[in-house]
Amino acid sequence: MKYVKSNSELILNGKKARHENALLARLNEAQHLDCMVAFAKGSALKAFLPPLKKALARGMTARFAVGLSFHLSEPKILRQLFSLRGDGLNLYLSNDRERTFHPKIYSFREGAGSTVFVGSANLTFGGLAENYEASIRSSEPDGHLAAAVAAHFDDLIEREVLVVATSEKISDYALEFNVHDAWRKLARKRAEKITSEDIRDVSWLAFQLDDMKRDKSANGFVAQQSLREQNVDSSRRQIRHLSAVPRPSSASFLPQYEQPAHRHCTN
C-alpha cells in the first residue's frame, strides 16, 4: 500500500483564528467544494456568502447538503443557497425523517490535492466564529480524502438520504420551521417565567396539562385517566366484596387482595 504524506491541523474558534478564516482562505483557491452540515443559519451569510459568490464567479463548483432534522436550519439561508444553483452550486436537503443528518464536513478540491475539514462546526455564525468548536483540517497532495467525501455524498444521493432542493420543498419546510420556531420561543418564555417568578404561580402546569392531553394514543393522558377511573371503580367493588367475606382464610383472601393491589401498582 502506498502512503501519501498529509498535513493535519486542529482548527478552533478563538481570538486569533476561527473556522471562518480557515474556510474562507480555501474558497480563494478551490476548484470544487463539497459541504455537508447538520444545520445552516442566516447568521453565516454575512461572512460566508460574498466569498462563496466570488469563488463561484471565477469557476468553482459546489455541492451543499443541509440537514433539516429538528427544524433548526433556517429557510433564509436555504433560499440564498438555492438562488446560486445557476452559478455552479447544487443544493441538497436531508430526506430521512427517522435518523438525524449530522455531519459537518467542508471538502475543498484544489487541482490534484485537497483540503478537508471534519469536525463540529455547522454553517452558522456560532459554528464558524463564536462557539467552542473543533475540527481537523487535513491537506493531502493526492486528494484521496476529498474523493472519499465525494463518494459518500454520491451514495447519500443515490439512496435518497439527500434529495435535490426545489422551491416547493423549501417552502414546505419553511411552514414547518415557522411552527416549530414559534413553539420553541413560547417554551423558552415559559421556562424563563417559571424560573424567574414566584413558584406559587402554577400557570405553567395548565400549559403542561394541555400539552399532555393532545396525546390521543392509548398511552396518552386522557386514555390513562379513563383507565385509572375504571380501576378505582373495580377496586372499590373488590374491597366491598372482601369486607363481606366471613372469616376468610389466607388461601382465599390473598388472591382477592392482590388483584386490586397489583392493578393499583401497575397503573
Image (cartoon, rainbow, N blue to C red):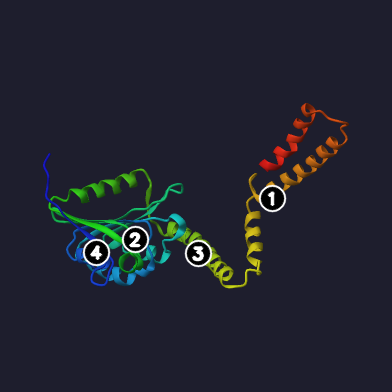
Q: Disc 2 versus disc 1: distance between alpha carbons?
A: 41 Å
Q: Identify the residue shown where x is 78% and y is 40%.
A: 235
- Going from N to C along the chain, the mark reached first, 2 or 3, is 2
33 horizontally vs 110: left or right: right
Neighbor class of circle 3 (other Cα within 10 Å; few <14, some 14-19, many 20+) is some
- The residue to which callout 1 is attached is 222
- Residue 82 rendering spot, x and y as whole percentages: 35, 62
- The residue to which callout 4 is attached is 23
Q: Identify the residue shown where x is 19% and y is 60%.
A: 30
- Residue 197 rendering spot, x and y as whole percentages: 60, 73
- The residue to which callout 2 is attached is 122
- Residue 202 rendering spot, x and y as whole percentages: 66, 66
As drawn, the residue found furthest toward the top would be 251
Q: Identify the residue shown where x is 22% and y is 65%.
A: 22
- Going from N to C along the chain, the mark reached first, 4 or 1, is 4
- Going from N to C along the chain, the mark reached first, 1 or 3, is 3
Nearest the eye: 25 or 88: 25
Residue type, mark 3 in image: Asp
Nearest the eye: 115 or 119: 119
Q: Which mark is residue 181?
A: 3
Seen in the picture, residue 29 relative to 1 is either above or below; the reply is below
User: Which image quadrant is residue 243 in?
Assistant: top right
User: Which image quadrant is residue 124 in?
Assistant: bottom left
Residue type, mark 1 in image: Val
Q: Quadrant of the N terminus?
A: top left
- Residue 92 rendering spot, x and y as whole percentages: 35, 54
Q: Secondary structure at mark 1?
A: helix
Residue type, mark 4 in image: Leu
Q: Secondary structure at mark 3?
A: helix
Residue type, mark 2 in image: Asn
- Going from N to C along the chain, the mark reached first, 2 or 4, is 4
Residue 79 visible, this orientation:
yes
